[in-house]
Image (cartoon, rainbow, N blue to C red):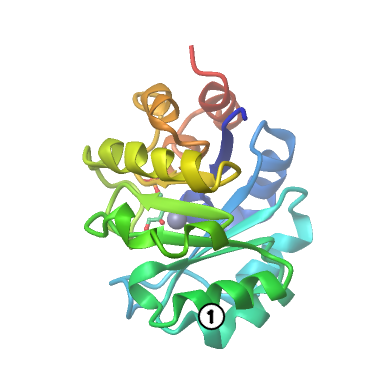
Amino acid sequence: MNHLIAPSILAADFANMQRDIEMLNQSEADWIHVDIMDGVFVPNISYGFPVLQAVKKYAEKPLDVHLMIVDPDRYLKEFQQKGADGITVHFEACTHLHRTIQGIKELGCRAGVALNPHTPVAFLDDIIEDLDLVLIMSVNPGFGGQKFINNTYKKLHDLKALSAARNPNLFIEVDGGVGGQNVKELVNAGANVLVAGNSVFSAGDQALAIKNLKNPQ
Ligand code: DX5
Ligand code: ZN
């Protein structure tokens, strides 16, 4: 499969969100990545339901919701109702991950699990068949604009092997510090969904930045 691009609106201009969503609608972006942070699981607070709902009003592409929150089970239904097409929870935030994943699927959403930089891919061994997506964090979650962690490549190789053996349709997403400098290497290592915040929204021509991520030279 050709890789997908999921720009993260954490780096968008919040005072001009409609304009930025319309830019994404016109661009080669495949999904729109929405980072939800609760100030507990991560040391930052981003935005919640009202913003998701407002984005949904204009978005013509699927919303890929990344929950950096504790106890996500409490809110899954509301995220689906407010517009999430896919919901990704953190491995480190879920005591009963199997139940959480089934809950996301019952809502009709694509079910994903995110791994912090220190969490090994091997921890997914007993749930890999149940997952639609695995998100490899290539920075510590909580902030945009951080430096890419190189150990991500090793984790992508591990996940690619696990996926090839047991879940060949898995979306393998990488999130944090992604841009023109590493897109080719990430795709070669097995990533098939690339999240990009600052490398898209700080570009002079944002649609062109997305096009370049989609079609690396
Ligand atoms: C970080 C978020 C990312 C963030 C990526 O906690 O999960 O999605 O928006 O931002 P960049 O691409 O700027 O590293
Ligand atoms: Zn994210």
Closer to us: 105 or 9: 105
Instruction: Tell me what residue is drawn at x 71 percent, y 74 percent.
Output: 107
Does residue 177 appear in this view?
Answer: no
Task: Return the residue at label 1.
Answer: 99
Instruction: Tell me what residue is drawn at x 41 percent, y 47 percent.
Output: 175
Place of residue 91 in the rendered image (x, y in percent of width and height, measured from the top left): 38, 68
Does residue 149 appear in this view?
Answer: yes
In this view, the residue farthest toward the bottom is 74
Q: Quadrant of residue 190?
A: top left
- Whether label 1 lies within 8 Å of ligand 2 gets the answer no
Place of residue 160 in the rendered image (x, y in percent of width and height, measured from the top left): 42, 38
Closer to us: 18 or 122: 122
Place of residue 96 in the rendered image (x, y in percent of width and height, measured from the top left): 44, 82
Q: Quadrant of the N terminus?
A: top right
Mark 1: few, some, or many residues within 10 Å (few <14, many ≥20)? few
Q: Is 180 located above or below residue 148 in the figure?
A: above
Instruction: Tell me what residue is drawn at x 61 percent, y 53 percent.
Output: 16
Question: In the displayed structure, does residue 90 sit left or right of residue 201?
Answer: left
Q: Is 34 located above or below residue 199 in the figure?
A: below
Residue type for callout 1: Arg
